Image (cartoon, rainbow, N blue to C red):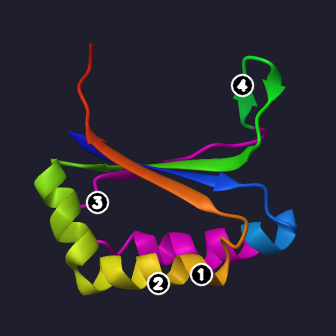
Amino acid sequence: MAKIIAIYQQPADAAVFDDYYFNKHVPLAKTIPGLRSYEVTRGDVMGMAGKHGAYLVAILEFESMSAIQAALTSPQGQAVAADLANFAGAGVDLMMSETRLV
């Protein structure tokens, strides 16, 4: 397995972010070829010292890193990447890696 982890920072207006993210970005992202699952945090993102600075964390699962590369270079992947500018003005950190169960 391989995953993309997207960590979105606190938006200026959470309601506007949520509306765009769940009604436009998520449906667009679900068209990415090879996407096996898509999960997001619900409620506050917590750290060891309490509420974390991150607003929302999304985890997208694929079969492998090569599947992620194919997904990101697809027209749908390019459209999803371009869409970030429409709602993630506070910033988003994207990480990807092979994963394994231990």
- Disc 2 + disc 1, Cβ < 8 Å: yes
Q: Secondary structure at mark 1?
A: helix
The type of residue carrying mark 2 is Ala
Locate residue 99, reporting x and y percent. Answer: 26, 32
Residue range corresponding to the magenta coloring = 19-44
- Disc 1 + disc 4, Cβ < 8 Å: no
Locate residue 70, reporting x and y percent. Answer: 16, 68
Left or right for 46, reference 40: right
Q: Secondary structure at mark 2?
A: helix
Please tell me whether residue 9 is drawn above or below residue 102 in the rendered image. below
C-alpha gap between disc 1 and disc 3: 21 Å
| Residue linked to disc 2 | 82
The type of residue carrying mark 1 is Ala
Q: Is residue 33 visible?
A: no
The type of residue carrying mark 3 is Leu
Q: Earlier in the sequence, mark 3 or mark 4?
A: 3
C-alpha gap between disc 2 and disc 1: 6 Å
The type of residue carrying mark 4 is Gly
Q: Residue at x 66, y 70 (%)?
A: 88
Tell me the tag on residue 47: 4
| Residue linked to disc 3 | 35
Left or right for 101, reference 6: left
Residue 59 lies within the magenta run: no
Residue 39 lies within the magenta run: yes
